Amino acid sequence: SQQGEEDPQALSIQEGENATMNCSYKTSINNLQWYRQNSGRGLVHLILIRSNEREKHSGRLRVTLDTSKKSSSLLITASRAADTASYFCATDAKTGGFKTIFGAGTRLFVKA
Amino acid sequence: DTEVTQTPKHLVMGMTNKKSLKCEQHMGHRAMYWYKQKAKKPPELMFVYSYEKLSINESVPSRFSPECPNSSLLNLHLHALQPEDSALYLCASSHPGLAGGPSYNEQFFGPGTRLTVL
């Protein structure tokens, strides 16, 4: 199976609520990144966390990384309708030349 | 300039056609990538160029032929494609890592080319 797997596959919340997405991976990594994609267009980089970091913040985003459990979470606080998008984790897996592998993604829908 | 541009935005081609997708960035990035994305699926890595040299080819069929003419440009030449090759083709660029390889840093993505093969 693929390197990054995410849950939930889909998440529907009300504006103002927090959204949490989880990502698991299988091999050793150098870093883990989160990206957002609106309506099948280009991906936008949100945050990068290195394997020696445990938590990182950027605005309303909080990312954690647990290398012992090979998992990461993305928390979006005080969600807005504009946060509606697909969210992907991507790992810089230490296999076959450090290629980037994306997880299956979580589709977030924020209702106004 | 923090933008990756891709042309064309949409492309419809027959199975016997030859076409090319183009990608350009002026951020000084020396790693560039091609991804293929099917509907409701994650992007799948196809090729990686690092310092204008092909460093990763993910067993992509030879009907897809990448080219990196210089550090700002990346092309994907298409020939004799199949209908199952219809997808969104994404280009990305990044600073190449040092010990960590080309995918060590954040990638900047273009808007993609939506390809339909008839």
Image: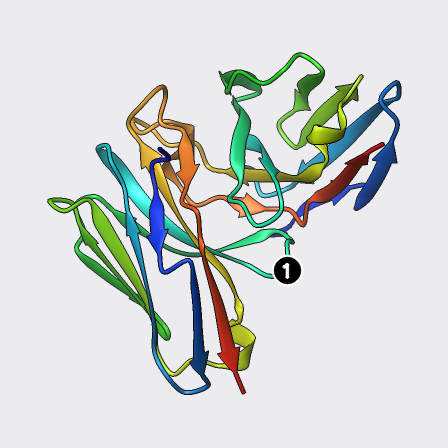
Between residue B86 and residue B20, name the one nearer to us: B86
What chain does mark 1 sit on?
A: A
Query: Residue at the left extreme?
Result: A68
Res. B111 in view? yes
Q: Residue at x 42, y 29 (%)?
A: B102
Q: Residue at x 63, y 40 (%)?
A: B90
Q: Which quadrant: the N terminus of chain A?
A: top left
Q: Which residue is mark 1?
A: A39
Task: Provide residue B29's location: percent of width, then percent of height.
Answer: 53, 36
In this rendering, position of residue B72 left or right of residue B107:
right
Q: Amino acid at mark 1?
A: Ser
Task: Provide residue A97's location: percent of width, then percent of height.
Answer: 36, 21
Query: Relative to residue B6, is residue A108 depicted above or below?
Result: below
Q: Quadrant of residue A62?
A: bottom left
In this rendering, position of residue A42 left or right of residue A73:
right
Q: Which quadrant: the C terminus of chain A?
A: bottom right
